[in-house]
Amino acid sequence: MVLKRFKNTVYFILLACISCTAQESKTKAFSSLGVAANRTEAYLDLLQDKKVGVVGNQTSVIFTSELEYVHLVDSLLNRNINIKKVFAPEHGFRGTADAGELIKDGIDSKTGIPVISLYGSQKKPNPEHLEDIDIMVFDIQDVGARFYTYISTLHYIMEACAEQGIPLLILDRPNPNGHYIDGPVLEEEFKSFVGMHPVPVVHGLSIAEYAQMINGEHWLNNGIQCELEIVDMEAYSPSMVYDLPIKPSPNLPNAKSINLYPSLCFFEGTNVNAGRGTSMQFQVFGSPFLDPLVFDFEYVPKSTAGAKYPKHENELCFGRNLQNHSDLDYVNLEWLLQAYHHTQDPASFFNDFFNKLAGNSSLQEQIQQGKTAREIRAGWQTDLEAYKVKIQPYFMYERSLP
């Protein structure tokens, strides 16, 4: 499908909704859908004879078979596309850095192309970075959670491109948590790099749909608009859950971790380890301070690639193993509440990061007040219903909202 392109406007032909049962959605093969990067006929003409910048990481690939792929940058270079720079998000261009680790500018050893870091002291390209760029390409696998920083990088890329009058080509990829929308909507005063927009924890949109929302809601600086060129996916339905073939970051190694991430990431704002420093990242949680009579799963976090300094390194942690837990279609608060109510030191349970992850101060207060998960979730519903109405103009793929 070829898209008609106009400045600040993309016209879509909605894909037919693919019906599937819950069981089918769990086993849907990623290779059965046409990710936008694979649809080279829809975007190569846009890049010919242009000086191109690419925002990408290890997930920016073109699939040559179900199990084989080539990096988008390598493929474009083989097609004589003039790539001037690569811009790397959190975890770096090759996706090996720790969460929060400073990423430095450098040169990609395979291609010799300059790599500009968008994580660390500078999260937005400056005008000098873009002065030799005619068009930017954004192709990164997101996981659909507000605090996963690739959508924050998208914001800053759009803003920089808009300020310099550079069009941004977005190659869309599936949202593995696109089958539901849940969590508190971020309040403006808690805006940060782990939450830049008034959206719930699980926002339900593909990366291209999210980009349209950034434009449509005038979230860029001074309400400016980024000129978007979008290539959509073929055979994609947000109701399906996809098993991603490449882990999107070092500590989301598999489908189970991606499914549990929106619920377990709250532990990053506490003294509880969420599996970093193990091979079970975001599939277990534990702490030396949790009651071993209540939490009978034990593990010891160790320094590993992607988690050099894990919380409670070399300490015995007591917690839960959730590797066999059924897949979630909501944000589970029960584990967070259980941990708080069975910690030896509730005064030091939360840290300063928690409210940024929650997007408010009320979640921490409600937990400390002894509110139940049902009571807390009830307070989200009005904002969630308003959000579900707001996002509908940005849909590229047919779906039904609960």
Image (cartoon, rainbow, N blue to C red):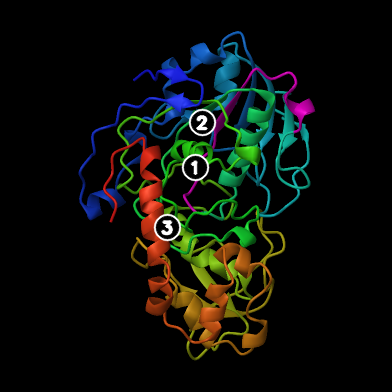
Residue on which disc 2 sits? 61
Q: Is residue 362 left or right of residue 108?
A: left
- Asked whether residue 352 is drawn in magenta, I would say no
Q: Is residue 71 left or right of residue 175?
A: right
Q: Position of residue 339 (x, y in %)?
A: 52, 81
Query: Label 2 sits on what residue type?
Result: Val
Residue on which disc 3 sits? 259
Residue on which disc 1 sits? 246
Label 2 vs 3, first from the N-terminus: 2
Q: Position of residue 154 (x, y in %)?
A: 59, 39
Image vertical order of residue 378 relative to residue 187, above or below: below
Q: Which residues are magenta?
A: 126-145
Image vertical order of residue 385 relative to residue 391, above or below: below
Query: Label 3 sits on what residue type?
Result: Asn
Quarter of the image with the C terminus is bottom left
Query: Label 1 sits on what residue type?
Result: Ile
Q: At 43% across and 41% down in the image, what residue appears?
A: 206
